[in-house]
Structures are given as C-alpha cells and as structure tokens.
Amino acid sequence: MKSLRITCAAVLACASFAAMAQSADDVAPTHWRFGIQLGTVQDHNNTEPAAQVSLGYDVNRNFSVEALANISLLFMRVGGLAQGDREFDSAVGARVLGTLPLGDQWKLTGGLGVVAFQDEVGDATGNSVNHHRTSPMVSLAAMYRMSRRWSLGAEVSSFTAEHTGNAGLRAEFHF
C-alpha cells in the first residue's frame, strides 16, 4: 500500500510540473527578459550600424524597467572628422516601459529613460574629441510574442538631447 501511495504522489507531482510547463503566462509568468537589437543609429548627419543589448524586468503586464547598452558596430573608422562632424560611439542607460497589449501576442511599448552618451566630434585640427553627456531617451516598440520564451519586433528610439535616432529589429528571450 505504501508503494502505491508513493507512485500516485510521484505521478501527481509529474503531472503538476507538466501542467505548469504548458501553462499560459498568466499562470506561470516570465518576469525577466534579455533583448538584443540590430539596426542603425543616426547621429546628426552620419548613419552607422549599431547593436543594443538590454536586461528587463516586468513589474506587471503593463509596466517594466530595463537597463540597456547601445554601441556602434563601426569599430574602425577611416579618416578624421571634419570640424563639427559627429560619430556615435556608445550609450548606457535605463528606462521605464509602459505596455499596451494589442491582443494575446501583439503589444506596443513606449519607454522613457536616461542614457550616458558618448560620441566623437571633429575639431579644427582634424582630430576627434570624445564627448560624454547625459541625454533623455524615448522609445517605441511593436513586439510579437511567438512563444512563452521568445518575442520579435521592431523598435525606434531617440536620445533627444543629442538629436540621435535609432531603429532596429529586436529579439527578446523571456525567463
């Protein structure tokens, strides 16, 4: 009789774990996410390829917070900058995101945050000088939740004080 009880308890435990693994996000939510984005950044007159990585936490279905890093993919640049020309280098920051669900799988997300921004500015001697500044950041993303773990979408953002715009395709892994 004891072995029958142990077997029944093991079967019920396995069934509950299997049900949890197949349950919807409302029953077994994934609060954390890691995102990667590939696209372009436009700093004044220059457009360059850029990548962004982020780590976010969903407070609830409508609000989340996210830390991010954005970097230019042009590691080696040819020639010096003319006086006043700018080239984006990197940005690190954080933002608060508000989400508008557009159904079970689509969502529209707007963000507001602050970034520490670095770019190179050409001087009169033909050299470039690194500038470090802080800028507000605004963003808008449309995301499609493919499964419990994966989302794909597109995002546009701007470092408003620096007149820099970003656009790219984004993938997120939810855990």
Image: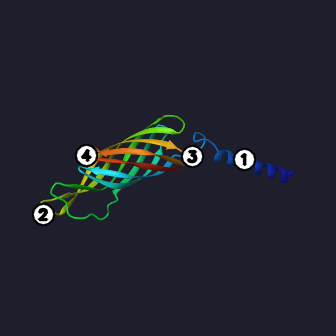
Identified at 27% across, 44% down, the residue is 160
Q: Give me the C-alpha separation between circle 3 and circle 1.
A: 19 Å
Q: Give me the C-alpha separation between circle 2 and circle 1.
A: 72 Å
Local crowd at mark 3 within 10 Å, few (<14), some, or many (≥20)?
some
Residue at far right of view? 1
Instruction: Determine if residue 70 is in view.
Output: no
Mark with earlier residue (3, 1): 1
Q: Measured from the top left, where is residue 104 in percent x and y? A: 54, 36
Identified at 27% across, 63% down, the residue is 77
Circle 1 SS class: helix
Q: Measured from the top left, where is residue 12 in percent x and y? A: 75, 47
Q: Give me the C-alpha separation between circle 4 and circle 2.
A: 25 Å
Three-letter code, disc 3:
Arg
Mark with earlier residue (2, 1): 1
| Residue at numbered disc 2 | 125
| Residue at numbered disc 4 | 163
140 shown above or below 86: above
Identified at 34% across, 59% down, the residue is 73
Local crowd at mark 4 within 10 Å, few (<14), some, or many (≥20)?
few
Q: Give me the C-alpha separation between circle 3 and circle 2.
A: 54 Å
Local crowd at mark 1 within 10 Å, few (<14), some, or many (≥20)?
few
Check residue 148 in the rendering and tell me which mark sits there, or answer none: 3
Circle 2 SS class: loop
Local crowd at mark 2 within 10 Å, few (<14), some, or many (≥20)?
few
CB atoms of marks 4 and 2 within 8 Å: no
Three-letter code, disc 1:
Ala
Circle 3 SS class: loop
Q: Measured from the top left, where is residue 1 in percent x and y? A: 87, 51
Mark with earlier residue (4, 3): 3
Three-letter code, disc 4:
His
Q: Residue 161: which quarter of the image?
A: top left
